[in-house]
Amino acid sequence: MRVEIVCTGNICRSPMGEVVLRHKLAEAGVDGVLVSSSGTGGWHVGDRMDPRAAAALRRRGYDGSSHRAQQYQRSWDRDLVLAMDAGHLDTLTRYGVAAQLFARDDVPDPYYGEDDGFDEVLAQIEKAADAWVDRLRDGQA
């Protein structure tokens, strides 16, 4: 199964979601799920994750150092596409993609806020990732 997590520029929310979901799937022993992330826009393609996002991940024991931003491509074949907020969901729907929200509520963009916003977003991502692990393990995705 291929899972894609999508945000705006693929330097904050979606790479955090990718790292966390991949880690939690491995911890739960759920095999056969490949997780990647991308952005709806291409202005950060090739860039590393925002340093504040990477620092928040490190503080919680995750490693996001290998991430490089990429733009979502309509031609990609994904079994499950998860949008970080309603705006991304709308964009993906316009692309003809049957996407779902990653979390119950929109995951807010921490980019223009204070550093602690990244920790708050990470906590929301971890909670949502736990729910996705359960759904993916049970074949309900």
Image (spheres, rainbow, N blue to C red):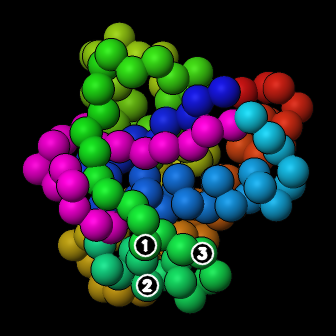
| Label number found at residue 65 | 1
Q: Amino acid at mark 3?
A: Tyr
Provide the residue span drawn in magenta. Answer: 33-49
Provide residue 73's location: percent of width, then percent of height. Answer: 29, 26
Residue 49 vertical position relative to residue 97 in the rendered view, above or below: below
Q: Earlier in the sequence, mark 3 or mark 2?
A: 2
| Label number found at residue 140 | none
Residue at the extreme left of the image, as rendered: 43
> How many numbered callouts?
3
Query: Residue tagged by mark 3?
Result: 62
Cα distance in 3D space between marks 3 and 2? 9 Å
Q: Earlier in the sequence, mark 2 or mark 1?
A: 2
The answer to whether 30 appears left or right of 114 in the picture is right
Q: Amino acid at mark 1?
A: Ser
Query: Is residue 87 shown to the viewer in this render?
Result: no
Q: Secondary structure at mark 3?
A: loop
Image quarter for residue 117? bottom left
Dot in front, 1 or 3 = 1
Residue drawn at x 19%, y 50% as measured from the top left: 45
Q: Secondary structure at mark 1?
A: loop
Image quarter for residue 44? bottom left
The answer to whether 15 appears left or right of 32 in the picture is left
